[in-house]
Amino acid sequence: MKVDIDKNSGYCFGVIRAIEIAEKELQNSKILFCIGDIVHNEMEVKRLEEKGLKIITYDEFKKLRNVKVLIRAHGEPPETYKIALENNISLIDATCPIVLNLQKKIKKSYEEIKENKGQIVIFGKHGHAEVVGLLGQTDNSAIVVDNETEISKIDFSKPIRLYSQTTKSIDEFKKIVTIINDRTKLSQSIDNNFFISHDTICRQVSNRSKELIEFSKKYDVIIFVSGQKSSNGQYLFNLCKSVNEKTYRITNAEDLNIEWIKNAESIGVCGATSTPMWLMENIVNFIKEL
């Protein structure tokens, strides 16, 4: 039986950086708070909790005083920084540089367009931590659009500036751009700057799609490793399954069903951008032992 791991799977740059910052801080601190899961993978969160990381909710954060709190790669809205200042909280900021740059772009665009009663539109998942941080740059006035059916929320009589959550699908973003562009042509405005779209999708994440499709075609069975909370994991899992029907999603080795692999001559193990390489390596070793 041949068992291979996809070397392109695993953490993106932003997540690697956030975990490295957390581990470095935990070497000197007995406890470090983090607003929400540092990464959407239960096994990695458990590993870091054993080192002293404590995951808290936003409401719990607001009650803290005189402690250190990690801001994960997804970033936070301005309100979080304000609360930290008021409560003497030391922030360890691990916001992904790509997300941080996007926050700055949206804030600048919002300040410019609000004078003309324009709209900031964010193509992203409702309630996602990154999107919450982006919304905060617009005083929570931006319109979040998760799919084509939600485009009706946009007022096409007003200027539009479109941005995307960094981890969304490029193809889906292009569809959204096309639909909004067609709708704005029907408006009375002839201003070329009426609708401007900004492709702010991280290519390190988006390129995984093509790589995983090719990887999934090469094996009899695909074992996809991902945390249950990972939206990126759900998307990439569905992508793998679309080209290889014998694709199974697990969170750890205990989830593996021997019936899935007992007749397979080749097995490919891969995962989401929130899946640690050490976890995929453990699963490969577990399969080889079986």
Image (cartoon, helix red, strand yellow):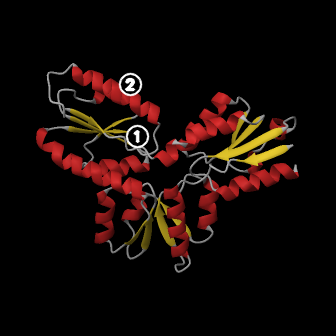
Q: Secondary structure at mark 1?
A: loop
Label 1 and label 2: CA atoms lie apart by 14 Å
| Residue 250 point in image, percent of width and height | 69, 44
Front residue of 163 and 92? 163
Looking at marks 1 and 2 on the same chain, the residue that comes earlier in the sequence is marked by 1
Q: Is residue 6 left or right of residue 231?
A: right
Residue 86 position (above or below residue 156): below
| Residue 118 point in image, percent of width and height | 18, 37
Give the number of the disc on residue 47: none
| Residue 220 point in image, percent of width and height | 78, 34
Give the number of the disc on residue 149: 2
Whether residue 265 appears in this view of the structure is yes
Whether residue 37 appears in this view of the structure is no
**Amino acid type assigned to the residue bearing label 2 in the image:** Thr
Residue 70 position (above or below residue 216): below
Query: What residue lies at 81% left-to-right and 52% top-to-bottom?
Result: 286
**Amino acid type assigned to the residue bearing label 1 in the image:** His
Residue at label 1? 126
